[in-house]
Amino acid sequence: MQKNRDLTIALRVYPGIAKTFPKDFSFGEKINLIEASLFSLLKACGNLKVKLIVIADSCPKDYYTAINNVTQRFAIDKFQYINVDFASNRDTFIKQVMVLLNERSDYLMFAEDDYLYKDSAITKCIDVMEDNRHIDYITPYDHPDHYSLPIHLPLRGDIPTLSNGIEWRGVGSTTCTFLTRKKILGQDKKDFLSYRKPSLKKNCKYVGSDIHIFLRLTKKTLFRAHLYFFYFLKSTRIGKRIGGDYLAKVLFPNYQVSVPGLKKLIDVWLCDECDLIERLRKKTRTLYAPKANIATHLCKNFIHSQREWLRLYKKLIKELR
């Protein structure tokens, strides 16, 4: 018996276009991309009871009309449009956290305006979370990093699960597009409110990024000394002087890249938001991702099967017109 099929989505919208956007996806004004992204997102929700909250940062007035027209195509439960003038990724994310903390839906989704989704992608995420209560966070995006970065190697508690013909596995981090439960977000709000927060430590400029937040929650790197040695070899001057690239290749043949680097890995545990002892005592969270191409971030270096997504994008634009 299915329960708690209600979902609140907080979607962040900004009129600027990222430099990493793939050139083949020509769309003119940013609003055209936003319409296609939202259209695919709502189609991906299937029969879920959806409340949509759009956080529009520094957007022209006609954005409301365009976005509202897309929502009219779906039987969503509620639609709310919030105008802000932050021109800041960090500030809109904090706003997103605070907005979702005040919602009553059991499931909550953080969404961004440069993603595309295949039909029922979000429904499949909810299905997995309903059947596996040990999953705290889930993303529909099969990030390429999940196949190459050693920070995503499974821990003992990461049990792969099969749902709707898709294998879902535990990973270390993801982007700022993900789903969780209201209870979990409330318990972890301090970590999310640290997003891009300036650190008191002079050399700690990376504190608060999405990768740091999720690595603190999943603790994927905490007790893995070999990971720190690998990143020492690959990303430090001393490591490179002693032939780090060669040694890393010999000792860790399955570790393909050095990102995020030793310093960034250490910075995960130096966040000023809460002390290290408190973080270590905190329950380890699970974050799951599909081994399937059901959603993508439109970033030229992190998109699976670009031709496939380009065809879907053109199809969405045609349906909207």
Image (cartoon, rainbow, N blue to C red):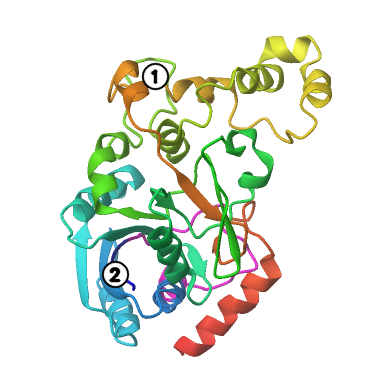
Q: Is residue 208 magenta?
A: no
Quarter occupied by residue 123: bottom left
* Residue at point 20%, 51% (across, down): 101
Residue placed under numbered mark 2 in the picture: 3
Residue nearest the observer in this picture, 271 or 219: 219
x and y percent of residue 194 in the render? Answer: 30, 33
Q: Nearer the viewer, mark 2 or mark 1?
A: 2
**From where the camera sits, is residue 173 visible?**
yes
**From where the camera sits, is residue 113 visible?**
no
- From this view, report whether residue 151 is shown above or below residue 166: above
* Residue at point 50%, 20% (across, down): 266
Could you say whether the residue bearing mark 2 is in a helix, strand or loop? loop
- By secondary structure, the bulk of the magenta-drawn segment is best described as loop
Amino acid bearing label 1: Leu
x and y percent of residue 132 in the render? Answer: 43, 55
* Residue at point 47%, 37% (across, down): 211
Amino acid bearing label 2: Lys
x and y percent of residue 254 in the render? Answer: 76, 35
Q: What's the CA distance linking mark 2 and mark 1?
A: 40 Å
Residue placed under numbered mark 1 in the picture: 270
x and y percent of residue 263 in the render? Answer: 54, 20
- From this view, report whether residue 288 is shown above or below residue 148: below
Quarter occupied by residue 153: top right
Residue nearest the observer in this picture, 121 or 246: 121
Q: Tell me if mark 1 has few (under 14), some (14-19) or many (20+) residues whose alpha carbon lies within 10 angstroms of its own.
A: some
Residue nearest the observer in this picture, 40 or 30: 40
Q: From which residue to which does the magenta span run? A: 11-35
Q: Mark 1 or mark 2, which is nearer the start of the sequence?
A: 2
Q: Are marks 2 and 1 in contact (CB under 8 Å)?
A: no
Could you say whether the residue bearing mark 1 is in a helix, strand or loop? loop
Q: Identify the disc placed on residue 148.
A: none
